[in-house]
Image: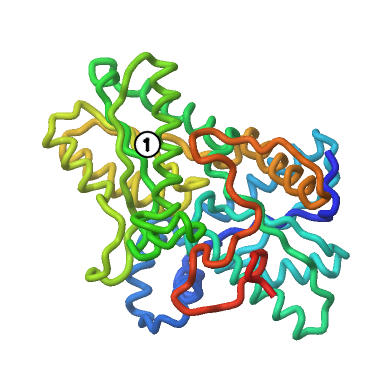
Amino acid sequence: HDPAPYDALLLLSFGGPEGPDDVVPFLENVTRGRGIPKERLKEVGQHYFLFGGVSPINGQNRALLDALRTDFAEAGLGLPVYWGNRNWAPYLTDTLREMVHDGRRHIAVLTTSAYASYSGCRQYRENLADALAALEAEGLPLPRVDKLRHYFNHPGFVEPMVEGVLASLADLDEPVRSGAHLAFTTHSIPDSAADTSGPVPDHGPGGAYVAQHLDVARVIADAVRERTGADHPWKLVYQSRSGAPHIPWLEPDICDHLEELSAAGAPAAVMVPIGFVSDHMEVLYDLDTEATAKAAELGLPVRRSATVGADPRFAAAIRELVLERAAAERGTRAQRCFLGALGPSHDLCPIGCCPARAERPAAAGADSP
C-alpha cells in the first residue's frame, strides 16, 4: 500500500454540460479549430437537450471519485484524488494548478478511457502537455505526470461487465434467452485512427483499438458461457459515428447490426457497451434511445447491459493500477492483473503510439520533453 513516489491521483475525463446554457459552449470546446458553425452545434446538441441539457458524465465521475476515496481510505492508502476534464469544468489546467498549489509534485493520472487510440489516449496526453505549458507560463513549478496503463483487460473492469450481461440475459423472457446474441459496442473511430492505434508493432487493420475490444468481448462471452451453459453468438459493433460521411469509420453500426440480426431470425439481443466506462450520453442516447427504438421497430427483444461506472471492484482496480505503477517507478516488481490473451498494457506510451495527424507535444510518453 505504498504509493510513493506518487503524492496524488488525477482522474482525467472528457467533461460534459450541466445545463441547457452549457451545451453549445461545451460543443464549441469539443470542436475547437474545426470551424463548425454555431447553428450546426445547436443541432448536434439536441441529444443533450433531450436530457435537460445535462450530460450524465460529470455526475458519474463524482460517483467514481467518491468510490475511489472510500476504497483508498478502507485500504489505508493516503493518496488524495483530484478530478479534471478536457472540455468542461473542472478544467484540467485549473485542477493541475490547484494540485501544484497543494504541493503535489508527482501525479498518477487515470483517464476515463480504457483502450488505445488517439482520442482515448494520446489526445489526453496532449491535453496534459498543454496544461503543463500553461502552468509553466505562469511561473509555477511543474509536477511530473504519469498516465496509468490501459485497463481494458483488468479483472476489476471486466468482471462487472460480465455480471451486467448475465443480469440482462436474465431479464429477457425465457423462450428467447438462450438464443440471444451479444452485441459488444464501442465508439466508432475513423479507420485510419484505428489502424495506427497502439504501439507501432500493433499497427495494421484495426490496430490495437480493435484487437483490445475483441479480446475483452471474447473474455466476457467465454465467462457468460461458463456461467450459463449457453453459447451466445457475439459480434463487435460500433456506435456514435460522427464526421464527414466520405471518411471510412469502423463498422457495422449497432442499428445496422440489429437489422441484420432481425433479418437472420435472432430471437433477442443484449447490447454490451464495453467501450464505455459509464452511462454517459453516447450510452443513454445512442443505445438506450436510438438503438432501442430501432429494436422495437424490428420487433427484436433487446436489453442493454450495465457499464462499470463506480463499481467498487473498478475502484479497487484503479488502486491496484496506482500501486503497481508506483512499484515500477521505485524499481520493484508488482503483480499486473489482466484477463485475456493480450497481457497487461505498457506503462509508458512508446514513440509512434496512436500518432496525431499533426504533431503536437504530449506528456507522459517516451516522446515527451
Name the one closer to the observer, 219 or 313: 219
Q: Give percent across and percent down for residue 291.
A: 28, 46
Binning the other alpha carbons within 10 Å of mark 1 as few (below 14), some (14 to 19) or many (20 upward) gives many
Q: Amino acid at mark 1?
A: Arg
Quarter of the rendering occupied by the N terminus: top right
Across and down, in percent, residue 75 comes to 80, 34
Tell me what residue is drawn at x 75 percent, y 38 percent. 334
Seen from this angle, which residue lies furthest left? 263
Above/below status of 310 relative to 6:
above
Residue under the point 27% across and 26% down: 180
From the viewer's perspective, is 47 left or right of 157? left
Of 200 and 15, which appears nearest the observer? 200
Residue 7 in view: yes
Q: Position of residue 128 (x, y in %)?
A: 65, 69
Choose top left, top right, bottom left or bottom right for residue 24: bottom left
SS for callout 1? strand
Which residue sits at x=72%, y=41%? 319
Position of 269 with respect to 148 (left or right) is left
Residue 91 seen: no
Work out whether residue 337 or residue 26 is closer to the camera in this orientation and state it. Answer: 337
Q: Residue furthest right?
A: 103
Query: Mark 1 sits on what residue?
Result: 304
From this view, report whether residue 70 is shown above or below residue 360.
above
Question: Percent position (x, y) of residue 216?
Answer: 45, 38
Dividing the image into 4 quarters, which one contains the C terminus?
Answer: bottom right
| Residue at screen point 69% across, 72% down | 93
User: Horizontally, is 229 left or right of 21 in the view?
Assistant: left
Q: How many marks can you see?
A: 1
